[in-house]
Amino acid sequence: MYELVTLTKRHIKNYLRDKMSVFFSFLSIIILLVIYLLFLASLYGNLEGFTEVENSIYTVGYIMGGVIVIGTITLSLGVIGSYVTDLESKKINGFLVSPIKRSRLIISYYLSTVIITLFFMLLMFLLVFLYLGILVGYWYSLTVVLYSILTIIVFVFISSPLVVFLAILIKSNNAFAALSAIIGTVIGFISGIYVPLSILSPFMSNLASLMPFSHMTIFLRRLLIGDDILIQIPDEALNDLGLKNLNVFNLNLSIYLILGIFLVISLSLLVFSYLRVNKKQKNL
């Protein structure tokens, strides 16, 4: 256990020490916020017939729902990049010749990814909570707060294994950096984070329904906006705003079932990643 804790701390410190890595991890989040503030705030941020407070709750919930979801991906990519760096620089070979068990080494990379991603995403939710409470005068109930925290935890456990799986397929930092940039952009569009899924073609909408991030974005936005506001929005408008739950190829499945399926798939990919990396390191 001591070895696992020490290795996890080492990966966390390495990530936080590299300021450029931290910056680029937040780049997609910064871009998303700029897009909303400069271009989309007026389009999706004002609902007719709602009070100023309700519009503020809606706008913050809509924006931050997407920001937190994409953050679980970009931050995870930034942290797991330490594995690619260690692999390319051969530092990982030094760990392998030590008495450290391979299982603990591999798990330490995953744990560092989860810990940092979860910390920053919960911090982001805290800022949302304080912003609405102090500046808008609206405080989320304890139920919503606890439910949001649990939701973010589940989202991190869905995103992080997917990122780990992608990282083990990469052998260089340049390739990993290119992949990270592509993933952040593609997920932002195809998951309805940058623009509502309602403007996409039927084919792209069906493709989006197979991605966990589409469902995660809708779920978190609805949670942060709240039922009191959502119930006043017509179904057609909910669909146009990208707030209506997605069917998976015309199958009307419960959002909890969908997230549960994606969670199982992600954890299965984590096990596969562990077996693959363990086999690869044995051949070094």
Image (cartoon, helix red, strand yellow):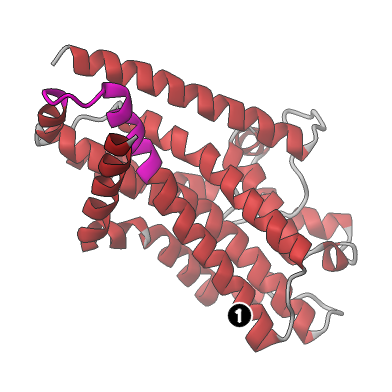
* Principal secondary structure, stretch drawn in magenta: helix
Instruction: Tell me: 198 left or right of 67.
Output: right
> On screen, 140 above or below 171?
below
Towards the viewer: 180 or 155: 155
Towards the viewer: 38 or 143: 143
Image-quadrant location for residue 174 = top left
Q: Quadrant of the C terminus?
A: top left
Residue 107 lies in the magenta stretch = yes
Residue at 33% from the left image edge and 17% from the top image edge: 276
On the image, the x and y values in percent for residue 224 come to 71, 63
Image-quadrant location for residue 143 = bottom right
Q: Label 1: which residue?
A: 131
Mark 1 surroundings within 10 Å by alpha-carbon count, few (fewer than 14), some (14 through 19), many (20 or more): some
Q: Secondary structure at mark 1?
A: helix
On the image, the x and y values in percent for residue 26 come to 38, 61
On the image, the x and y values in percent for residue 83 come to 25, 37
Residue 57 lies in the magenta stretch = no
> On screen, 84 above or below 29?
above
Q: Is residue 187 visible?
A: yes
Residue at 69% from the left image edge and 85% from the top image edge: 136
Instruction: Tell me: 71 left or right of 149.
Output: left
- What amino acid does circle 1 point to? Tyr
Q: Is residue 184 visible?
A: no
On the image, the x and y values in percent for residue 220 come to 67, 54
Q: Quadrant of the N terminus?
A: top left
Towards the viewer: 245 or 144: 144
Residue at 78% from the left image edge and 78% from the top image edge: 54
Q: What residue span does the magenta drawing correspond to?
A: 96-112
- The number of numbered discs placed on residues in the rendered structure image is 1
Residue at 42% from the left image edge and 49% from the top image edge: 115
> On screen, 195 above or below 1?
below
